[in-house]
């Protein structure tokens, strides 16, 4: 039976009414957060928190008139931008053979006198036993690559693919590698606490790819950028909480970010629940960026990420770059220019990311064709049925 939308709509209406009631208080918190941010930048001080976040503010590119933001100052006629994105088909328990597929989409755009565009995808089937698992070197333990682990594996393959392209690229014009989302292994926190799994994904995959890109970074290879649309991050908000919270920094995260307004009504400086993008929505004009916020996660420079917020016209986007990728003010200006120009071409979202996604996406028809092809090849010269009754039932009903 289909979803009863009428019954669902009544529940949504109740939720919407409650949300509207609470938004007034939330809006007050947003204003407090903006005031705190402006006050902090007015002092022009580098700040380090006494907690695990370890942020400091980098004012690279700021001039005296640019007190709270940096406008786009470089406009490129020639540049190259390369993006990779991925999707996958996981292990299907209705099929007799275990396998999965990762499809990496690639968009490579060159702008200028020798303008060129290349779109392609690279599908890879993982079906051998050694391809389906991550194992300890001594063979005492292993993890099957599925679910969140497969998500992490796919995000690593996207970075590896980008590193391989950049490794063979002749950087005649300013070049940027652009990925959708944060510069991180997607889904890693929920994957495993086994060190050999972390080493396989992070050290041997993600960090090795970043090291390769870093080794190629010069005056024309600007490096790698992560673009997050509608970011839900609260890093700057928490940063500000530690400065102004009257409950103390050790409690600010709990008082300000994870409790409802009625529970924190006694906190006069509360900015709980405020998203970073809400702080910058009224501060940054189109084309302007925030300072760079640097977070040193560990002693490994390769894995240290910095970020800033950028008004691309349609929204406030979060831009992530490796710390080693910050360079000088001119490099950041060029990165800012490329992202703005790409967002303009894509009506608010970088066109190169859009095209890489289109190359990577696997729709429902593709998934059915993939399963049917496996069954067809397994069934050749064999009268046995390789399809489960459940799968056949879904096919008959067109599900």
Image (cartoon, rainbow, N blue to C red):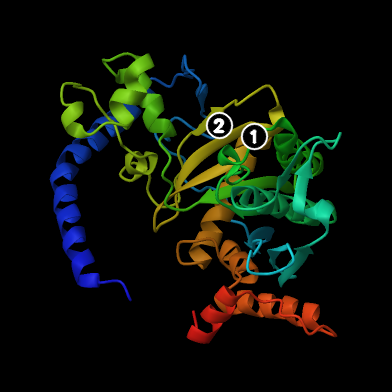
Q: Is 127 placed left or right of 117 in the picture?
A: right
Residue at the outermost front position: 384
Residue 264 pos. (x, y %): 20, 26
Residue 273 pos. (x, y %): 30, 36
Residue beneath the point at 51% across and 29% down:
59
Viewer-side residue, 100 vs 183: 100
Residue beneath the point at 79% across and 41% down:
135
Residue 254 pos. (x, y %): 33, 24
**Crowd tier of the residue under label 1, counting other residues whose Cα lies within 10 Å: few below 14, some 14–19, many 20 or above:** few
> Which quadrant holds residue 185?
top right
| Pointer 2 with pointer 1, Cβ within 8 A | yes
- The disc, 2 or 1, on the residue closer to the chain's N-terminal end is 2
Residue picked out by circle 2? 60
The Cα atoms of the two marked residues, 2 and 1, are separated by: 7 Å
Q: Is 342 placed left or right of 261 in the picture?
A: right
> Looking at the image, is 199 positioned above or below residue 387?
above
> Looking at the image, is 389 positioned above or below residue 266?
below
> Which quadrant holds residue 5?
bottom left
**Crowd tier of the residue under label 2, counting other residues whose Cα lies within 10 Å: few below 14, some 14–19, many 20 or above:** some
Residue beneath the point at 45% across and 62% down:
348
Circle 2 SS class: loop
Q: Is 246 placed left or right of 333 in the picture?
A: left
Residue picked out by circle 1? 328
Circle 1 SS class: loop
Viewer-side residue, 155 vs 245: 155
> Looking at the image, is 94 positioned above or below residue 286?
below
Residue 237 pos. (x, y %): 37, 31
> Which quadrant holds residue 122?
bottom right
> Does residue 132 appear in this view?
yes
């Amino acid at each position: 039976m289909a979803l009863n939308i009428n019954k669902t709509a009544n529940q949504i209406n109740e939720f919407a009414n409650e949300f509207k009631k609470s938004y007034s208080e939330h809006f007050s918190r947003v204003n407090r957060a903006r005031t705190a941010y402006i006050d902090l930048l007015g002092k022009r001080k580098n700040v380090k928190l006494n907690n695990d976040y370890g942020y400091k503010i980098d004012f690279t590119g700021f001039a005296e008139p640019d007190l709270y933001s940096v406008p786009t100052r470089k406009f490129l006629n020639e540049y190259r931008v390369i993006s990779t994105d991925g999707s996958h088909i996981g292990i299907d328990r209705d099929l007799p053979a275990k396998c999965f597929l990762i499809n990496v989409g690639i968009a490579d755009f060159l702008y200028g006198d020798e303008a060129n565009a290349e779109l392609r995808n690279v599908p890879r089937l993982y079906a051998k036993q050694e391809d389906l698992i991550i194992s300890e070197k001594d063979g005492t333990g292993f993890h099957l690559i599925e679910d969140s682990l497969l998500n992490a594996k796919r995000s690593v393959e996207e970075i590896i693919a980008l590193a391989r392209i950049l490794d063979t690229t002749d950087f005649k014009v300013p070049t940027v590698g652009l990925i959708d989302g944060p510069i991180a292994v997607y889904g890693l926190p929920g994957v495993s606490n086994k060190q050999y799994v972390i080493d396989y994904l992070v050290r041997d995959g993600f960090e090795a790819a970043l090291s390769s890109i870093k080794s190629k970074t010069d005056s024309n290879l600007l490096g790698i950028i992560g673009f997050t649309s509608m970011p839900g991050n609260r890093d700057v908000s928490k940063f500000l909480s530690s400065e102004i919270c009257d409950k103390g920094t050790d409690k600010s995260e709990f008082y300000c970010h994870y409790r409802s307004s009625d529970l924190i009504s006694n906190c006069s400086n509360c900015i709980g629940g405020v998203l970073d993008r809400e702080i910058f929505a009224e501060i940054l004009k189109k084309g302007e960026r925030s300072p760079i916020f640097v977070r040193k996660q560990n002693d490994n420079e390769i894995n240290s990420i910095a970020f800033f917020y950028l008004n691309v016209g349609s929204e406030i986007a979060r831009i992530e770059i490796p710390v080693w990728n910050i360079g000088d003010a001119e490099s950041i200006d060029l990165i800012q220019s490329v992202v703005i120009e790409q967002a303009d071409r894509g009506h608010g979202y970088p066109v190169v990311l859009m095209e890489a996604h289109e190359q990577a996406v696997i729709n429902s028809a593709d998934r059915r064709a993939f399963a049917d092809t496996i069954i067809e090849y397994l069934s050749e010269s064999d009268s046995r049925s390789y399809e489960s009754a459940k799968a056949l039932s879904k096919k008959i009903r067109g599900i």
